Every structure is written in C-alpha cells, then in structure tokens.
Image (cartoon, rainbow, N blue to C red):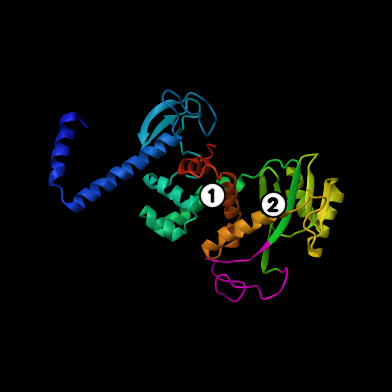
C-alpha cells in the first residue's frame, strides 16, 4: 500500500463502528499469524530450498501462492513451496496454525481447539492427525546406560467407528474380564535414565515382538531393567542383552540401590493422566497420541508453538 493510501486508511479508522473495528483487528491478527508461518518455514533471504521431489538444489523462483513463495525445479520442472511433501501440504487456514499449535501444546480437545481457532471441529480433527504424523514416527534411536522397560495396558477403544465388534459402553468404562485380555491393548515403553524414550502399541506381548521393537534401540553396552515377567527374561536370553529383573510383585522396588523401573512407571502414570482429558482415544489413533506425548515430555523446556510446528513439518 502506498503512503497516501495508508494515511487515508488511518484517517478513516475514526469513522469505523465498533463491529468494523473488531473485524479489522481480527483481519490484522490473521495476517500477522500468516506471516508467522511464513517466517517459521521459509528459507532465509537469498537462500532457496532443494526440490522435495528430486532433491536438486538451486531452483528458480516462481512467484507466490497462498502466502508462500513458489519455486520451480530446474531438473524435474515441478513447482513447490515450503510445505510441499510435508504432512501439512494442501491444508488451508494457515493463519490459524499458530493458535492451533498452542492448543495442542496445552492438550486441548478437538472441539476446544476449534473454538480457539474459529473453525469447524472436523477441521481441527484433521489438523491434529496431520500434525502428529511426524511425531508419531520419531522415536529414540538408541537407549544407553541403564534402560527401563515396562508394559502397560489400555482399554481397547473403537471410538468413532461404526459396526462395533462388541456391545457399546460408556467412555472410560471397564473391561468385562479381569486381568489381561483381548479387551485391552498393550503399550510398551522403554526409557533410559537420560530421558530418551521409545513407546509402541504392540499387537501381542511376546518375546518375538520385543526382539522386533526393543532390540534395535538398545546399545551394545545397555543394561535393561524390567519387572520379573518371563517375556523379558526370554528376550534377554535370545538377544544376549544384559538384564536385571526387579520382582515388583514381591514388593521389591529397587535392587542394589540402582536397578529399578520407577522412571518408566512414572512415565506411564504421567501419560495416562494426560490421556484422560480426551475422554477415550480410539485405539487406531493411539500411536499418534504416544508420539504427541513423547514430544511434550522430551521438549518440556521448549513448549512453544514454533517448536511444535517445525516438528510437524519435519524441520527439527
């Protein structure tokens, strides 16, 4: 806008009604949030991103679209922007994302996020699981020193599905059968004393399953602590992992003042407390929530919308 046009706009602001002023402030706030997204993800001035399709560097600038700079690859001739080939590609209302990222850090429900962003709840539901694609995949690559592993069980849920395979129940209900059964789903959490965490939803809790998900993240010199369940002993015998079992069922909490599973049990407790706010989570989406909480727990000192957004697009 030219200087004289801007001056006229300022002069005309005195004649605006209260409703018009509120609408103008809302538009200015949306524009500021849109600019925030651009600043967070676009390359610095003078730099150009590599093509997300063929990885060729130094693309040609190709105008702007939907508030983002476009580029054209010299090699494959395809156009792209900073969100191309990310989980957030083709989503609309980018100006709402800073507010939405804040609601996810706060653990708001889908409907509460929708109210905060001024969009329909189906939109925030779609955003939630797009934002969680990368956190769901990001696990600790290696556990070092003393690693603790323990399983916990959550009630299997078909929330949101049609054609239930059981009689419907109220949210937060209890399993009809006591102890472990097909009504529950197993979640394995492995965590070292440095806070590195891996968590998985297991189809079954067996030695072979542990070999597939636990062995790859244990360093050669890692000592594994667990309870006395026979599956862990069989896993240690199969893989040669140094193993220390704590007989929790007998009331033994700590062995030799060093070996225990209290850290991972505390993690279970925090996760389940955090999960209750959602009034039941569909089992098919449970891996997303595990990734969500891993990020929150691992970034407790940097819980800001920008950090969460950059994780969601794979830039951190």
User: Is residue 119 left or right of 175 when viewed as pictured?
Assistant: left
Residue at figure coordinates x 45%, y 35% from the top left: 41
Residue at figure coordinates x 36%, y 37% from the top left: 35
Dot in front, 2 or 1:
2
Magenta-drawn stretch contains 114 = no
Q: Quadrant of residue 65?
A: top left
Q: Which residue is mark 2?
A: 263
Residue 189 sits above or below residue 70 on the image: below
Q: Quadrant of residue 284?
A: bottom right
As drawn, the label of residue 58 is none
* SS for dot 2: helix
Residue 43 sits above or below residue 221 on the image: above
Dot 2: within a 10 Å radius of its alpha carbon, few (fewer than 14), some, or many (20 or more) residues?
A: some
Q: Position of residue 248 (x, y in %)?
A: 78, 61
* SS for dot 1: loop
Q: Quadrant of residue 81?
A: top left
- Asked whether residue 66 is in view, the answer is no
Residue 151 sits above or below residue 144 on the image: below
For the C terminus, the quadrant is top right
Q: Position of residue 187 (x, y in %)?
A: 68, 58
Dot 1: within a 10 Å radius of its alpha carbon, few (fewer than 14), some, or many (20 or more) residues?
A: many
Q: Which residue is mark 1?
A: 132
User: Is residue 97 left or right of 198 when viewed as pictured?
Assistant: left
For the N terminus, the quadrant is top left
Q: Position of residue 278 (x, y in %)?
A: 52, 62
Q: Say which label, 2 or 1, has the lower sequence index.
A: 1
Q: Residue 182 or 253: which is nearer the viewer?
A: 253
Magenta-drawn stretch contains 180 = yes
State the extent of the magenta-drawn residues as a range.
153-181
């Amino acid at each position: 806008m030219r200087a004289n046009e801007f001056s006229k706009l300022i002069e005309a602001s005195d004649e605006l009604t209260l409703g018009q002023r509120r609408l103008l402030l809302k538009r200015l706030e949306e524009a500021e949030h849109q600019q925030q997204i651009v600043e967070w993800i676009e390359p610095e001035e003078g730099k150009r991103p590599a093509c997300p399709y063929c990885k060729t560097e130094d693309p040609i600038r190709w105008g702007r679209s939907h508030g983002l700079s476009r580029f054209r690859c010299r090699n494959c001739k395809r156009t792209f922007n900073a969100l191309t080939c990310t989980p957030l590609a083709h989503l609309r209302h980018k100006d709402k994302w800073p507010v939405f990222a804040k609601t996810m850090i706060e653990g708001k429900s889908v409907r509460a996020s929708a109210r905060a962003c001024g969009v329909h709840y189906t939109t925030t539901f779609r955003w939630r699981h797009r934002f969680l694609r990368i956190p769901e995949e990001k696990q600790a690559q290696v556990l070092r020193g003393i690693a603790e592993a323990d399983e916990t069980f959550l009630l299997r849920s078909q929330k949101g599905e049609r054609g239930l395979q059981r009689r419907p129940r109220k949210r937060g209900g209890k399993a009809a059968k006591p102890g472990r059964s097909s009504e529950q789903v197993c979640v394995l959490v492995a965590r070292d004393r440095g806070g590195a965490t891996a968590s998985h939803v297991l189809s079954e809790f067996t030695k072979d399953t542990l070999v597939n998900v636990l062995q790859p993240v244990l360093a050669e010199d890692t000592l594994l602590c667990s309870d006395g369940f026979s599956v862990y002993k069989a896993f240690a015998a199969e893989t040669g992992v140094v193993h220390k079992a704590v007989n929790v069922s007998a009331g033994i909490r700590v062995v030799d003042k060093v070996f225990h599973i209290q850290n991972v049990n505390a993690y279970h407790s925090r996760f389940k407390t955090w999960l209750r706010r959602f009034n039941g989570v569909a089992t098919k989406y449970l891996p997303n929530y595990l990734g969500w909480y891993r990020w929150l727990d691992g970034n407790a000192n940097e819980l800001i919308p920008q950090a969460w957004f950059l994780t969601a697009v794979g830039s951190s």
